[in-house]
Amino acid sequence: MDETKPKKLASRNVAIALGIICVILVAGLGGTLIVLNGANSKNASLQSQVNDVNNIIILNETEVCIYNWTNSIGPEKNITSLPIQMPFSGSVEVVGQIQPSNPNIWVSLTWTVYYWYVATPIPYQVPETPWFYSIHSADSFDFLFPIVSFGHSNSPQSQSYIEITVGNNDSALTSTVNVTATLTY
């Protein structure tokens, strides 16, 4: 009878050891799943950031910066938009409707980079930007202006802004102009 007791004790010790090993393995598996889930979440976040950057690189991001901006422009007058932040190089398309028809309506775009290396900003204003293409008639217009980075970044140290000016060179006619502008970057 003495011989059977050690076998029971050995079987019990083996069962306890296997139980502990199983608990450790289950805990390890659970920890691994938690770590993998966190890694998948970080991977998805990084993939989203990569997609955003790729869209910017291939000029696939668009943003309407002015929508249905309607103004009455008197003879030989012009009106300028508020500054619009331009986050990257790209283009600005300015589309408008003119009532009553007026072939003397014009559009220009200026671009300014503000450098904040000192307490007050130092503006660098790009001369009036030439357009890529223009479709202009007496009752509508569509201009596309390029915006090219000068190596600045949209950081607290430097920011670029555009302003759109619409003018009327007619000496007698007042026209109402409805403008929409879209940034592509």
Image (cartoon, grey):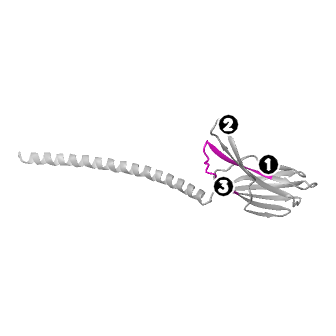
Q: Residue 185, image x and y in percent?
A: 64, 56
- Upstream in the sequence, badge 2 or badge 1? 1
How far separated are the C-alphas under marks 3 and 2? 24 Å
Q: Residue 102, image x and y in percent?
A: 88, 60
The reply to whether discs 3 and 2 touch (Cβ–Cβ < 8 Å) is no
Element carrying mark 3: loop
Residue 154 lies within the magenta run: yes
Q: Nearer the viewer, residue 69 or 121?
A: 121
Residue at position x 80%, y 56% in the image: 107
Q: Residues within 10 Å of mark 3 (few under 14, many from 20)?
A: few
How far separated are the C-alphas under marks 1 and 3? 21 Å
Name the residue carrying label 3: 148
How far separated are the C-alphas under marks 2 and 1? 24 Å
Residue 6 lies within the magenta run: no
Name the residue carrying label 1: 80
Task: Report the magenta residues as a range.
Answer: 146-165
Name the residue carrying label 2: 120
Q: Residues within 10 Å of mark 1 (few under 14, many from 20)?
A: some
The reply to whether discs 2 and 1 touch (Cβ–Cβ < 8 Å) is no
- Upstream in the sequence, badge 1 or badge 3? 1
140 up-or-down from 160: above or below? below
What is the three-letter code of the residue carrying label 3? Answer: Val
Q: What's the mark number on residue 139? A: none
Q: Residue 58, image x and y in percent?
A: 60, 60
Mark in front: 2 vs 1: 2
